[in-house]
Amino acid sequence: MNPKTYSAKRDDLEARWYLIDADGQVLGRVATQIATILRGKHKPTYTPHLNCGDFVIVVNAAKIAVTGKRLDQKMYYQHSQYPGGLKQETLRQVLEKHPERVIERAVKGMIPHNRLGADVLHRLKVYAGPEHPHQAQQPIPWQQPTVESWLAEREQAEAAEAAETEEAAETTKA
């Protein structure tokens, strides 16, 4: 075993594009998945000081779901730093005007608040409707990894490795 901790290099990183449909999904749960993908924590090559995450395209942001009475009780605040300069809007008002900003703001709170976080946030593309202009990148629909999918991938890799060793043994005999 190698006692050194693995640290990815910038040249080793390859960013993929994922597509997430937010239609009917709960805001906070989708935001945590997006933040995980953007940071790259779903990859075994995760390195905290590098932007090793992937690009995320979110469609149907206007159809996001929230639980409880959040549509009317959740408030977004802005202040101009002048007396009386407080502006506040409910989640319902923001969803009507700019539904993309709801998801962007939820994800922004879940990533680091520094230059790396700003770089990571640039990889998030949110659209209110089902259309997006990123067809050329061939985005993959996001599937939350499960233990079953991980075990299936592991079995496939082991089967492929066994076939390779068997094939190599046959070529050495001949």
Image (cartoon, rainbow, N blue to C red):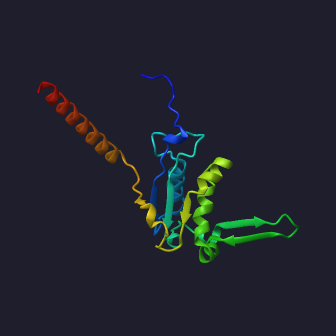
Query: Residue at position x 64%, y 69% from top?
Result: 73
**Image quarter of residue 152:** top left
Q: Which of 166 and 98 is in front in this view?
A: 166
Q: Nearer the viewer, residue 92 or 149?
A: 149
Q: Residue 62 at x, y = what percent?
A: 53, 73
Q: Residue 83 at x, y = what percent?
A: 88, 67
Query: Is 9 drawn above or below residue 65 in the view shown?
Result: above
**Image quarter of residue 147:** top left
Query: Is 66 drawn above or below residue 4 in the view shown?
Result: below
Residue farthest toward the front in the current orientation of the protein: 174
Q: Residue 33 at x, y = what percent?
A: 49, 54
Q: Report the side of 167 relative to 17 (left or right).
A: left
The count of marks equals 0
Residue farthest toward the right in the current orientation of the protein: 83
Q: Residue 153 at x, y = what percent?
A: 31, 44
Residue farthest toward the bottom in the current orientation of the protein: 96
Query: Is 174 drawn above or below residue 104 in the view shown?
Result: above
Where does the C terminus fall, quadrant-wise? Answer: top left
Query: Residue at position x 44%, y 66% from top?
Result: 135
Q: Report the side of 22 relative to 161 (left or right).
A: right
Where does the N terminus fall, quadrant-wise? Answer: top left
Q: Report the side of 32 relative to 75 (left or right).
A: left
Q: Report the side of 43 relative to 31 (left or right).
A: left
Query: Residue at position x 60%, y 66% from top?
Result: 102
Query: Residue at position x 73%, y 70% from top?
Result: 88
Q: Which of 114 and 72 is in front in this view?
A: 114
